[in-house]
Amino acid sequence: MIQFQCKWCGAPMEAPDSQAGQSERCGACGRDCPVPACDAAAPPRPKAVDAEDDLTWQEAARAILTFAAIVLALWAVFSATALTINPALLGAIILLLLRPRASHE
């Protein structure tokens, strides 16, 4: 059996190997969908996740939390003192505070 997805609605479909290259009617949307060849029918395997990808996501989450903390702190300072600040200056301050620092390993 060839397993594939309807090219119109994405519903999972299957057809006998003998129907490769022909059309099969989708049970979900009712449209004719071409049956792929046997070797093209297998869906691509997902990429394995390694420790480096996890570390990247952890660093991204840390940067987002740091950014939010800086924005809240600056907002509290400027709203408490009734000062106004140029948004471009605020962005520059945040970027300076979030810039990568050299590691001393």
Image: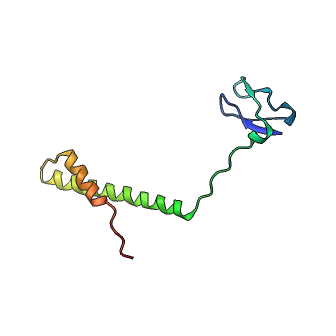
Judged left or right of residue 90, residue 44 is: right
Judged left or right of residue 48, residue 74 is: left
Q: Quadrant of the C terminus?
A: bottom left
Q: How many marks?
A: 0
**Residue at far right of view:** 18
Which residue: 69% across, 25% down? 29
Judged left or right of residue 42, residue 99 is: left
Image location of residue 79, percent across then percent down = 17, 51
The image quarter in which residue 59 lies: bottom left
Image location of residue 58, percent across then percent down = 46, 61
**Residue at far left of view:** 82
Image location of residue 47, percent across then percent down = 62, 53
Image location of residue 97, percent across then percent down = 27, 60
Q: Quadrant of the N terminus?
A: top right
Which residue: 77% across, 31% down? 35
Which residue: 31% across, 59% down? 98
| Front in this rendered view, residue 64 or 47 | 47
Residue 26 seen in this snapshot: no
Q: Is residue 67 above or below residue 35?
A: below
Residue 100 seen in this snapshot: yes
- The figure's colour scheme reads rainbow
| Front in this rendered view, residue 17 or 39 | 39
Which residue: 30% across, 58% down? 69
| Front in this rendered view, residue 48 or 61 | 48
Judged left or right of residue 80, residue 22 is: right
**Residue at far top of view:** 31
